[in-house]
Image (cartoon, rainbow, N blue to C red):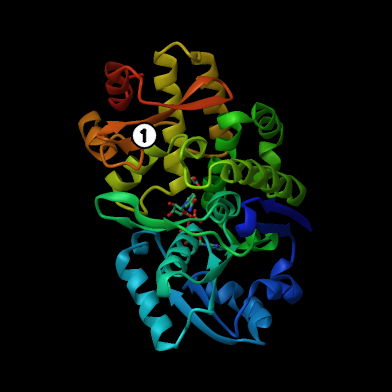
Amino acid sequence: METLKVDLGDRSYPIFIGAGLLKKQSLIAPYIKGKTTAVVSNTTVAPLYLESIHQNTCDYNNTDVILPDGEEFKTMDTLSQLHTEMLTARCDRKTTLIALGGGVVGDITGFAAASYQRGINFIQVPTTLLSMVDSSVGGKTGVNHPLGKNMIGAFHQPQCVIIDTDTLNTLDDRQLSAGIAEIIKYGYINDLTFIDWLDENMSKLMKRDPIALSYAIKRSCENKAGIVAADEKEAGQRALLNLGHTFGHAIETGLGYGKWLHGEAVAAGMIMAAQLSKEHGWISENDITGMRKLLKKANLPTSPPEEINAERFNELMSIDKKVQDGVLHLILMKKMGESFITNDFDKQALKKVLGHSN
Ligand code: NAD
Ligand code: GLY
């Protein structure tokens, strides 16, 4: 087992990575402070892994809350349903929530923990590759709004993150690829050596080679933990983690939540960010060709869906968390492996990229 740390002073917490960790009762116990737990999962993950979690919670008064599965259920309604079940089960301020599932379950559960009785503890047990390498780490929690993705939420850090790589055995190939998109993202933000490694090892990742997967998960979590420790509430540098996301969130919202997977939208979004960077002369067409090749090796899309035109993209992107005082900020690439946040970009060039005409 590997152990990493998210260094946030008295709110620091460990990330445990390894095979078979769900069955290790001694791992989770120190992070459950009170006598009650509530395991939050969904209709797909619960039949697979709830039993293993129960073995860890048998010393506690435990309630299970099983949510419907899907990005389209990452809503205030589902959050309210979760709050109702917690109140009915008499969860109190010492209850620990355990999020068992992908990023949707993790984000909703984290927000429930942030908001229930003004804040209770929670533990992340991510079961998709995407949630292992991104959403379970860093304390961003929340739900979608029909007008914008992840628009309602809070920063609330978990007590620990338990990544059992065995759970990836049941994940389908499309979801695996979506997770790889977020792994690739770390490379293009500021870790080109990792891109070289990914180029060489992509076929191993796609074949779920356990050593390659563990390495990619560990390196991604290290990258994320470092950025979160430096800028927990996104005053600056943390925004880099959103490379491709302003375009990607527009795709997800524009198509209707759940049509494209989050990782797929981020993959196309990274290419759009790269195209805009190229329009400014910061990176070359060759660089973009390399990005496309890598994303394609992971079976990821490299262009946005036809049905969203420039006008609709503009409309969708005007509701983004990186709009400040009405001004859109984007994560672009100063050069390959050096992303930065800026509002100083050519509006005509953006229009060209949004019109898919690169
Ligand atoms: P998801 O939670 O919808 O999971 C994908 C699918 O896989 C679901 O159907 C789920 O039930 C199923 N599943 C989960 N684990 C499984 C397993 N082990 N075996 C079989 N099936 C399994 O999607 P996701 O990609 O994990 O997460 C995407 C969400 O994460 C988006 O809502 C996105 O906004 C959010 N996100 C949040 C952050 C953050 O920092 N909080 C970062 C990135 C993404
Ligand atoms: N996934 C973006 C962030 O955690 O900041």
The residue under the point 64% across, 30% down is: 191
The residue under the point 56% across, 56% down is: 136
- In percent of width and height, residue 127 lies at 59, 61
Q: Residues within 10 Å of mark 1 (few under 14, many from 20)?
A: many
Task: Report whether 206 appears left or right of 105.
Answer: right
- In percent of width and height, residue 143 lies at 37, 59
Residue in the foreground of this view, choosing between 288 and 241: 241
Task: Report whether 157 appears left or right of 33.
Answer: left
The residue under the point 36% across, 43% down is: 249
Residue in the foreground of this view, choosing between 208 and 341: 341
Question: Eyeballing the image, is 118 above or below 243?
Answer: below
The residue under the point 59% across, 77% down is: 50
Name the amino acid type tagged 1.
Pro
Question: For residue 251, which quarter of the picture?
Answer: top left
Q: Quadrant of the C terminus?
A: top left
Can residue 301 be seen here? The reply is no
Residue in the foreground of this view, choosing between 102 and 122: 122
Q: Quadrant of the N terminus?
A: bottom right
Q: How many marks?
A: 1
Q: Tell me the residue that label 1 is attached to.
A: 304
- In percent of width and height, residue 138 lies at 55, 52
Can residue 6 be seen here? The reply is yes
Mark 1 beta carbon near ligand 1 (under 8 Å):
no
- In percent of width and height, residue 78 lies at 35, 70
Q: Secondary structure at mark 1?
A: loop
Task: Report whether 72 appears left or right of 127.
Answer: left
